[in-house]
Amino acid sequence: MEKQIATFKDYAIFMADKTSLLEIAQFVVKENYSHHLSSFTEEEINKDIKSVLEEEEYLYDNKSRIYIARDYLGKMIGCIRSFHWDKHKTLPIEKIYGINPLNAIHQESKYSFWHIGRFAVAKDSGISTLTLFKRLMALAVKPIVEDKYSYMIAEIDSKLLKVMKVLGFGTRQIGKSIDYLTSETVPVCSSKRGVMGFFSKYGELCKVA
């Protein structure tokens, strides 16, 4: 089920739930392939879609927040999700990089961790992808802003990471980059202070500040 939470000139943003995970997996994988690879097979795409879907279904719980942008024909043009880590489930950052946030970032029990992932924007949407990114990211990091002791953890495309730094994100790389889903991906974390460098500028874009 999806609930519309914001409306703009060319699209609307919805909060979604587990029923949207398959569509998100398909969208994220296909956009990654179209952005980064000139040739690929349907078998490769389907294998990655299956892998992403299984991972998202494993991570999903009632604290997960999924945001989808749709144009006025109902077509998905962007998505992102934030997941509150229970400190027990195996996160992508541990599965792919062998990094446990409790060891790499903070062990104090008062700190909480939000994993931000599955960000993608349609390559051919015809809208400002940067503005849509700011809006989706502002929604995704809002729980971190609202929590006194919290960290963002993510695996981010190296090119997108450069954009995030320009937009004010203070991040710390916590492992070596690897190729994941067709692009060089960097494991990072960001404290509430680091996130606020971005949110204080762009939170109002989605009326979430």
Image (cartoon, rainbow, N blue to C red):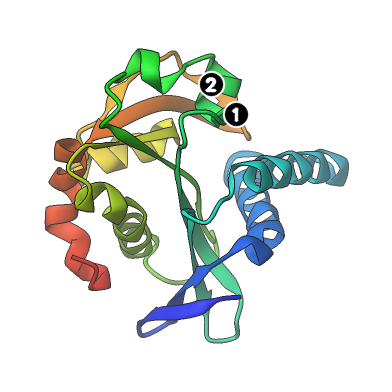
Q: Residues within 10 Å of mark 2 (few under 14, many from 20)?
A: few
Q: Nearer the viewer, residue 157 or 17?
A: 17
Q: Please report the residue visible at 31 percent of the width from the left and 20 percent of the height from the top.
A: 105
The residue identified by callout 2 is 94
User: Residue most toward the front?
Assistant: 109
Residue 180: assigned label:
1
- The answer to which image quadrant residue 114 occupies is top left
Q: Is residue 148 above or below residue 181?
A: below
Q: Nearer the viewer, residue 123 or 72?
A: 72
Which quadrant, please, contains the N terminus? bottom right
Q: Is residue 134 above or below residue 109?
A: below
Residue 150 makes an appearance in the image: yes
Residue 182 in the image, given as x and y percentages of width and height: 62, 33
Q: Is residue 1 left or right of residue 111?
A: right
Q: Residue type at mark 2?
A: Glu
Q: Is residue 202 left or right of residue 14?
A: left
Q: Please report the residue visible at 46 percent of the width from the left and 29 percent of the height from the top.
A: 87
Q: Of helix, strand and loop, which one carries label 2?
A: helix
Q: Is residue 182 left or right of residue 201?
A: right
Q: Please report the residue visible at 60 percent of the width from the left and 22 percent of the height from the top.
A: 95
Q: Of helix, strand and loop, which one carries label 1?
A: strand
- The answer to which image quadrant residue 190 occupies is top left
Q: Please report the residue visible at 56 percent of the width from the left and 31 percent of the height from the top.
A: 89
Which quadrant, please, contains the C terminus? bottom left
